[in-house]
Image (tube, rainbow, N blue to C red):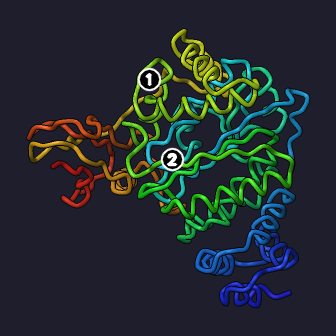
Amino acid sequence: MNIIEIIDKKRLGNELTYDELNYAFLGYLNKRHEDYQMSSLLMAILINGMTKEETINLTDIFIKSGDIYDLSKVSDKIVDKHSTGGIGDTTTLVVGPIVAALGCYMAKISGRGLGITGGTIDKLESIPKFNVNLNKKEFINNLRNVGFVDCSQTKRLVPLDKIIYNLRNNSGTTESIPLIASSIMSKKIASGANIILIDIKVGSGALIKTKKDAKLLSSWMKEIGKKYNKKVITIISDMNVPLSNSIGNALEVEEAINVLKGSKGRLYEASKEIASLLISMAKNITVEEASELVDEVIKNGKAYKKFIQFVKAQNGDLSKLKIDAKIKVIKSEKTGVLKNIDALKIGQLALKLGAGKINDRETIDYSAGIKLYKEINDKVKKGDILATLYTNKNIKLSNEDVNCFDIK
């Protein structure tokens, strides 16, 4: 086979066979192909798409590139959740402790940020000394002892996805539906969960821009799950407005802690919905019954205590979590009602402040980010503080950079 011929075949919109996909992707993993060649193939896939069969085949190739965890000795009902990415989406750090506090098990492999969307691993690394690099034995032990474990991919767990994930972020190919499906489902299946919830974010601040694409992604991931005998459910949620009032790594950890202590808002409601669905399936109870249990473990403090246990088990030191950055305040220039907070612009601004990165030469400033102080439909007076920006970069922000709020 020839990598150039495979690239050309997909560039022309033709379907690739299992063997062609295997040759191209495993060849890249084994360094037989160059970055620019795989980037060309990824761009051809982004432009021309893949069939369902191609997507299922690629997922299989991803899974078989490394280890597959067997968690059956811990429990016969291991849950997992994944979000396709959004602005201020910190649900994992809220849902995991809730699930564990209710006696269930959540095993999660998370990723870093893609484009302007934040990654859970980056958020966890903002906690000093937190260990995101667990080996298989540590992963299983933490799951058994805590009930919730979350770490990055090891060199042996879906290694093919790890390098393709990074290349997608650096080559402008993050929004490909089949590549998103293969990336998510390969990690979910390889890491051992058998009850999987996928939160598909749709809107300006998400990788998925339309409900049509979200429904397509949903159907494909369910098909992949069926092939591997996994129970997969999906929800489609809005990402035109940031999910929480904090955007940025350490800021989002603080926000998650506040929610676990009972703070209400968009992040609380989204986390409660996800946790209730997972608990209902794991315990075989109604969603309504599960929802009551979720409220109970937040109210009695058990969910927050479980978060503390989770962080300590992975060597994190919450006492040293801090926001060490220069502050700039954005004030309203007029009186009116806040009609919209543009998630895309907020994400782009957070990236510019240093909360994310667009290539491997850059580093993330864990203190960087944005705090929002107004909700949609709030009345706003001229001079009211809309947001606080945190950054250690010496950058000049234009009016366009901070034009994230629609006040009428």
Instruction: Name the quadrant containing residue 266.
Output: top left
- Residue 8: x and y, percent? 70, 90
The answer to whether residue 311 of the structure is visible from this angle is no
Q: Earlier in the sequence, mark 2 or mark 1?
A: 2
Residue at left offset 61%, top offset 30%? 275
Which residue carries the number 1 mark? 258
Q: Could you tell whether 353 is left or right of 408 in the image?
A: right
The quarter of the picture where the N terminus appears is bottom right
Instruction: Name the quadrant containing residue 312.
Output: top right
Which residue carries the number 2 mark? 237
Disc 1 element: helix
Residue at left offset 27%, top offset 34%? 373
Q: Could you tell whether 259 is left or right of 325 in the image?
A: right
Q: Is 160 situated above or below 147?
A: below
Residue placed most toward the observer, 3 or 386 = 386
Disc 2 element: strand
Residue at left offset 89%, top offset 32%? 72
- Alpha carbon of mark 2 to alpha carbon of mark 1: how far? 22 Å
Q: Could you tell whether 105 is left or right of 210 in the image?
A: right
Residue at left offset 19%, top offset 44%? 330
Q: Residue furthest top?
A: 300
Residue placed most toward the observer, 279 or 66 = 279
Query: Given contact means CB atoms under 8 Å apart, are the residues at marks 2 and 1 in contact?
Result: no
